[in-house]
Image (cartoon, rainbow, N blue to C red):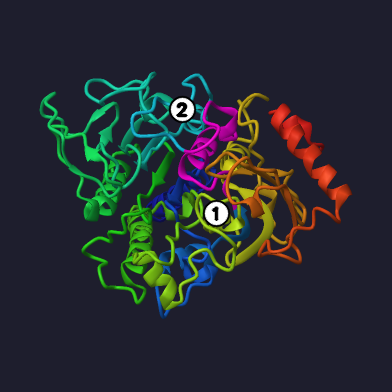
Amino acid sequence: MKINRLIKGLILIVCIGLVYSKANSQSKKPNVIVFIADDFGFGSTNVYGASKELIKTPNINKLADQGVRFTNAYTTGSVCTPTRYAFMTGEYSWRSKLKKGVVNMNDPALIDVNKKTLPKYMKSLGYQTAMVGKWHLGFKEKQFENLLGTIYPAPTDYGFDYSFALPNNLDDGHKVYIENNKIYGLRSDKICAYGKSFYGKQYTGYDAPQRVTENVTDDLTNKALEWLGTVKKDEPFFLYYAAAAVHHPIVPSPKMRGKSNAGAYGDFIQDIDRSLGDLIQFLEEKGIRENTIIVFASDNGGDIPNKKDIMPENFAVNKGLKINGDYKGDKHTIWDGGFRIPFIVNHPNVLKGNEISNVTVSTVDIYGFLADYIGNNKGLEKKDAPDSYSFKKAVLKPTKFYERPPLVHRDASGRKAIRFGDWKYIESANGGPMDIREQMLFNLSTDAGEATNVIDTQEKITNKAKGYLEKVINTPSKGIWKK
């Protein structure tokens, strides 16, 4: 009898422990991975229209099948730096000193170290934070000649506990990685300039391990996995993974070379998918996949060289790959091909799977979404993330109505456009071809290809658009739009 009571008591204790463990697991804040590919066009995955006969993206497909896929997602810039700045700060880049173009190789840090960046906010919620991959937001306080010595500011001065950064892009002149606030593997202060990059600029020649372009995808993936293996089990983590692919030069890893039917560019796309798959596999092996949010996006549209050039991108296009879908333009431009991107949010067992949302969202809104979804906006002041709007409603109920306030874009030259409802207004430009310098207005519900400028027949809409743009420019606050 006493034995039976003892057994029943043990069973009760085990059951209570299991219930407590499950409840504790569910109450724990979710881990977060934001995976941003580089120059990854809207039509570059199977779930966004790419034929499986050309490329295969099974991990991205599965992410969408088990999450929410957005069909009207955009970046704030059609080049790299503006989107990365907006993601980190929740603010349009043209509010900073960068009015056009991107941060160059020896430019100082673009982000004010006093800003409450997204990683700083995540740390305030108890997160362990890291960034691995393309930084492209500058280093140090002033223009510099080299990155020798201790670097300030570096990514770790913006809220990251750890960083392993590609300074600018896949083949920038630094040719090294930056780990935390120093050159990775630096042996001495000697500099011996040698060789030239894809862009024709001479490498700096630091006395440190030089990046091998074909190995960068694996280098970054392995560093991300290495950091994930060090995180404390009782604390949630936030990982900003900024892939180097598919920015040129097009150099797929040895593992993926020849694996697609769209040439080297297709292979490089599949490298992105493989890298994502490696991160997901780690989460599954550690038993934390179900408690991890993954956001997959790109920093701008795909970059398509002139047709006269013999480039891997052109080969893929000639094979039938619509890198930017059916949209006009590409990277650098003011057209939607430069801004429209794949955008997927996945949180197993919380968000419904295989959902499609056609509401307008942007990469600048990732900050606002995470702050709302995880932190209930606790700790955010009005000045923080001023241009970032939470799309939590659209994620939880993708088929329900959600309308984002007008969204502003800017191209490589600094020209702005504003999107609201079915309309896109583009301001006049000082340079460029004469036929597209004038202000333009497109009804995207009937003209998704931006072929017909209707500004002469839509005076009322044009004036509304100008008013919206002026309002956003002059009042950098979420409070300007009525909810």
Q: Does the magenta segment cover residue 99? A: yes
Question: Which quadrant, please, contains the C terminus?
Answer: top right
- SS of the residue under disc 1: helix
Which residue is pictured at 75% across the width and 52% down the height? 402
The residue identified by callout 2 is: 110
Residue 296 visible? The answer is: no
Instruction: Return the x and y of residue 16 as percentages of the image width and height.
Output: 49, 47
Looking at this view, is 108 or 440 the one in front? 440
- Looking at the rendered image, the disc whose residue lies closer to the viewer, 1 or 2, is 1
Question: Which quadrant, please, contains the N terminus?
Answer: bottom left
Which residue is pictured at 41% across the width and 42% down the height? 239
Furthest residue toward right: 460
Looking at this view, is 226 or 30 the one in front? 226
129 sits left or right of 50 in the view: left
What is the three-letter code of the residue carrying label 2?
Leu
Sequence-first tag of 1 and 2: 2
Residues drawn in magenta:
74-101
Residue 210 visible? The answer is: yes
Specify the quadrant of the image occupied by residue 451: bottom right
Instruction: Return the x and y of residue 323 as percentages of the image width and height.
Output: 48, 65
What is the three-letter code of the residue carrying label 1?
Gly
Instruction: Return the x and y of residue 459 as percentages of the image width and height.
Output: 87, 49
| Labelled disc at residue 338 | 1
Give the Cα separation between the discs numbered 1 and 2. Answer: 22 Å
- SS of the residue under disc 2: loop
Question: What is the crowding at mark 2: few (fewer than 14 residues within 10 Å), some, or many (at least 20)?
Answer: many
Q: Is residue 113 above or below residue 349?
A: above
| Labelled disc at residue 399 | none
Which residue is pictured at 22% across the width and 24% down the height? 148
480 sits left or right of 20 in the view: right
